[in-house]
Image (spheres, rainbow, N blue to C red):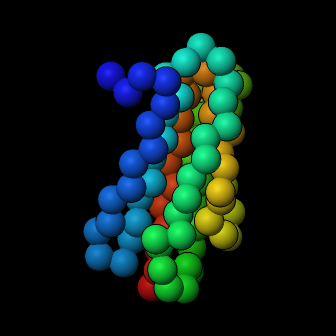
Amino acid sequence: YPGESAVLARRSGDTWYVAGINGSDEAKTLACDLSFIKGKKKNVRLFADDASGKWQISNIGKLPSKIDCQPRGGFVIVVNRR
């Protein structure tokens, strides 16, 4: 149980996966210090649920420092460095 929120990052080869979850009943903005992901970022995609609970997929182009999360929602960021 993560409490109120959690953000985790894992790498596989040249691809980073960052996932976050909001465990509260209120919308939250989660801070993400992703400065450890070095090198040129070729593709940065954000998968996040919207207010209706549907997943939205966006090519965001750069690493975000904050992500808005729905109540009991979450996100995944996929960063390809090749």
Give the quadrant of residue 2: top left
Residue 21 appears in the rendering:
yes
Residue depicted at 55% across the width and 18% down the height = 24
In percent of width and height, residue 53 lies at 61, 25
Give the quadrant of the C terminus. bottom left
On screen, residue 22 versus residue 57, left or right, reads left
Q: How many marks?
A: 0
On screen, residue 63 versus residue 74, left or right, reads right
Residue depicted at 53% across the width and 63% down the height = 34
In percent of width and height, residue 57 lies at 62, 50
Give the quadrant of residue 45: bottom right
Q: Nearer the viewer, residue 52 or 63?
A: 63
Give the quadrant of residue 6: top left
Residue depicted at 61% across the width and 21% down the height = 71
Residue that lies at the very extreme toward the left in this rendered image = 12
Residue 56 appears in the rendering:
no
In percent of width and height, residue 42 lies at 56, 80
Q: Nearer the viewer, residue 62 or 6?
A: 6
Residue depicted at 68% across the width and 24% down the height = 27
In percent of width and height, residue 61 lies at 67, 70
Give the quadrant of the N terminus. top left
Q: Is residue 51 above or below residue 47?
A: above
